Structures are given as C-alpha cells and as structure tokens.
Image: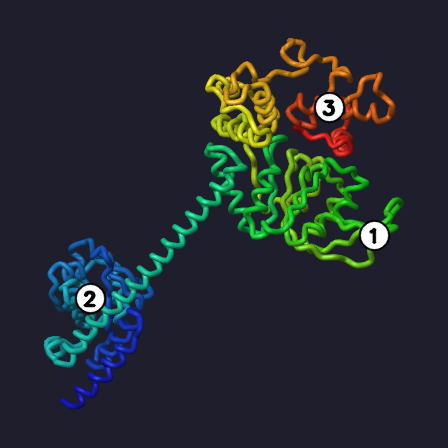
Amino acid sequence: MQMELHTGIELAVAMVQQQTLPELLRTATKQLETAFGLTRCWALELDLSGRLLHCSDLAAQGEFDCSDFSHPFSHILQTGKPRELTRAASYRLDHPGFQDLFETSNRPRSLWLEPLKGADDRILGILVMCRDGGDWDGIVSQPLYRGLKELLTLLWVARLQSRDEGWQRRFLKRSLDQLNDSESLRQRSEQLSRTLVGNSLVMNQLRAQVIRAAGSRLSVLVQGETGCGKDVVARGIHEMSERGIGPLIIVNCAAIPDTLLESELFGHTKGAFSGAEQNKEGLLAQANGGTLFLDEIGDMPMALQSKLLRVLESRQFRPLGASQEQHSDFRLVAATHQPLQQSIENGRFRRDLFYRLNQFPLRIVPLRERPEDLEALSRHFIRLYTEREGAGPQGISSHALHTLARYEFPGNVRELRNIIELACLQTPAGDDIQPELLRLEDPFCASGTGMSAEVEPKTMTGVPTSNDIRDLKAAAQAFEAAVIRERLQQYGGNRAQAAESLGLPKRTLAHKCLKYQVSES
C-alpha cells in the first residue's frame, strides 16, 4: 500500500509539472504504461464539434472522424461508458483510422476504451489502453488508477482553460490591433481626402494605397495621364510617411535641359565646368532625410539613367568635379505620364531602372473614368478660389454638374480646375456657377464664345503696346511668354499638346516655361 502511495505521488507530481495539454497527455499515458504494464496507451482529445478526436503522438493517423455511429469511438462518445474491445473484434472493424491505431499499438489482444469527463460531465476525450492480457477490472478498480484518472481530468480541464484564456487574450489583442489599425487608416484617409479629393471607389482605393506606400520604404512609381494629380499623390506619400518632417525635393526631369539636369541632381564644385563659379549643393543632397520626387522620369536622358540607378542602389553620389562621394538618405517617388514599357522596348528607358523604380506601383485613374468625383472636385476648387480671393461663388448648380459630366476632360483634374476658376471669376459672389459659364470648348475656336484664334500682343496680359516698347528683347520675351501661357490654358495645362500646337519640342517648351516662370494653370 505504501509502495502504491509512493508511486502515485511520483506519477501525480510528474503530471502536475507539465505546463501544456499535449505535454500532460504525453506524460500521463507514459506513466500509465509503466504503472500498469500496458503495451501502449493513448489519450485522444475531443474537439469542440464533439465528432473529431485528435492525438498529436500518432504520426500516421492523428485524427479520428467519429460522425459514423458504427465507429467504436463514436459508441463511447454516445454512451459515455467504457468498453473492452478484443483483437478479434478489432479486426472486424472496417475503419482505416482505427486500424492504423491498432497496427501502431502492435495489434494487442485487448483494448480498453474509457471516456474522460470533466466536472460538468462534458467528455474531454478518450483514454485508449492496450495490453495482451485481459482482466481490465483488476486495473480500473485500483485506487491508484482511479486517483490518476481523476487527477488527469482535473489537470486536463485546467490546461484547457489556460489555453482558452491565452487564445482569448491573443484574439483580443489582435482585435484591438485591427481596430486601432482601421481607425488609424480611417483618420489618415480622411486627412488625405482634403487634397486627394473624390468619393469614388477608385479614389478610396488610391488613398488606401498611398497610405500603405507611405508606411513602407519602397520606391514608388506613380503613373497617370497629364493633369491627373501625380504631384499631389507624391506629396501625400511624403506627408504621410515618417519622413514627413523632412524636405520634399521636386525635380521635373522634362523642365530642365539635359546639360543642366545632372548638375541640378548631383551638384558641382567650383570650376567643375565653364560657368561653375562656386560650389552648388545638388538636389540629391538636399533630399537627405526626406523624399526625392522625380517628376516626368520618362524624359530623363539615358546617360543619366545609369547614374541614377547606381545612386538608388547605394545612395552614394559624386558631385561634378568632386573627388569624394557623398551619401544621401532619401525616399524616392517617381512619376510619369509615358508608357515606360513601350519606352523600354524602344530603347529610351533602362529596364533595370524601371524595376528599381516600380517597387510600389500606383496608377491614377483619369477623370473621365470617375465622373462621380466631379462634384466633390468642383466644390473643392471653388473653396480654394474663395479662400484665395476672399470671395467667390457659393457652389455649383446641378445643371452645371450635368454639363461637366458630358465632357471628356482631356486635361484631367488640372483642366477642371482651370474651368472652375474661370467660372468663379465670372460668377457673382454668393451665387452658384451656372452651365453657361463653363468654358468647355476650344477657347481659340471661331465660334465666338471663346477667344479669337488671332492673338494680338495688345490683347495679352503683361504685353506692352508698340508705343510703350523701350526694350525690344524684353517685349519679345513677354509676347512669347503670353503666347505659351494662353496655349497652356487652351489645352488644360497639357504641355505635350501645347508644344505640338506651337511646333516646339516638349523639352524646349518646358525650358521656356521655367525661364519665363509660366505656370500651367
């Protein structure tokens, strides 16, 4: 009796020391095998459905589906009572899973199947004991067996509760994290909607993508037609990122001549070339700690593309004329309206640079494909006009919105802004914009509603009349600037179309815009 008590205490201590349910069941079955001379012992855990038994120690067949009522385990679960199963009876049971367990147990002469229940009489699982002798009553009637079985069920319930509490804590934490992330995403998206305006599905998706891009360190390539707001997206990525407190350096690759673009990016030392009278810090250095936005990256010369690729891979660069390299920690955002894949095929853009830029691709849908954003954008531009001018229209009429919805907007959002601002100028303060004030036709057409096709210097703002001219060169430049400004307004800020209409290369027009400080709006 003392030996049995001593053995029972050792077995009990061994089970109590196990922290997880699998460890407890593994220890308990091994202890039962040793204490009662069993050939094998298994503890099968019942899942929440009450139809599936699981044993992690069974490699070949760890799960038993007991939905078939002829299954021996199903009988135990239904009756809640133990039973003996002989080898002869086991051979007759046509259940592959059970046969695998029987073979793994080395085909014992007898099995004892006993349900284990918690305090609420809920079945926790089934204990399967195997031996070559019979007389199961001599084992299950022993105080040592009954005590160990009771301790096992108590510990089983405790480990289940601990596991459930841990799962609940993890679930609660995940739920709270998701709620916080969702609320943060909602707040950031709402903040972004003040500049990236629009209630359409594609705009909601774009704002979500901008926020995700801002949270990463990947290079972003923004693609979209001219005038759709690529610069606004780039600014949103910068301001939403951890670099938002740093500088945003904007480089228009199409507006700077090829001969100056490298110097603008990399900087130069005094005497590096003719006209370099002092050291100049390049835009790469200025972007340190912030974001570098390369607009119209498709217009970058091939020779400079290879140098840019090296900078993106190492963040190291050397100013023109310098002997030592410099380092700049910047985030890159690039934008283009050109189909870069076609430029790659035509040999005008490096494929390896494209892959380096296109780590996080963003596409802006043109305005004609999201007419549901017209009202929000129109009211946004009216508000900006009123804040700038101190007075303006109260809003826009539904008839005017219907008129806008029938227009294709080749100049996209930039063209809409020009149309709305001109209508604001002609609308009495406090009134709504009416459809007759929306200039949607070619302003240079001969219909008489717009401006005349013949543009005389005297009709252009900022151009002196012939009697006032004292400097012919300055007058010629003023006239050229006025023509460019009017033509950009005609094409809604689309430089490519304006350059083509004037018979100029796009790069030349961009250079003149920079020289004369001509804006696109």
Q: Quarter-wise, where is residue 4 in the image?
A: bottom left
Mark yes or no: residue 356 visible: no
- Residue type (three-letter) at the residue carrying disc 3: Glu
- Residue 425 location (% of width, % of height): 59, 21
- Residue type (three-letter) at the residue carrying disc 2: Ile
Dot 3 crowding, Cα within 10 Å, few <14, some 14–19, many 20+: few
Q: Quarter-wise, where is residue 124 in the image?
A: bottom left
Pair 1/2: label in front? 1
* Residue position for label 3: 500
- Residue 209 location (% of width, % of height): 51, 43
In percent of the image, x 21 and y 86: which residue is there? 7
As helix, strand or loop, the secondary structure at mark 1 comes to loop
- Residue type (three-letter) at the residue carrying disc 1: Thr
In percent of the image, x 65 and y 44: which residue is there? 293
* Residue position for label 2: 126
Dot 2 crowding, Cα within 10 Å, few <14, some 14–19, many 20+: many
As helix, strand or loop, the secondary structure at mark 2 comes to strand
Label 2, label 3: how many angstroms apart (C-alpha)?
Answer: 84 Å
* Residue position for label 1: 269
Label 1, label 2: how many angstroms apart (C-alpha)?
Answer: 83 Å
In percent of the image, x 77 and y 16: which residue is there? 458
Task: Mark 1 or mark 2: name the one nearer the start of the chain.
Answer: 2
Pair 2/3: label in front? 3
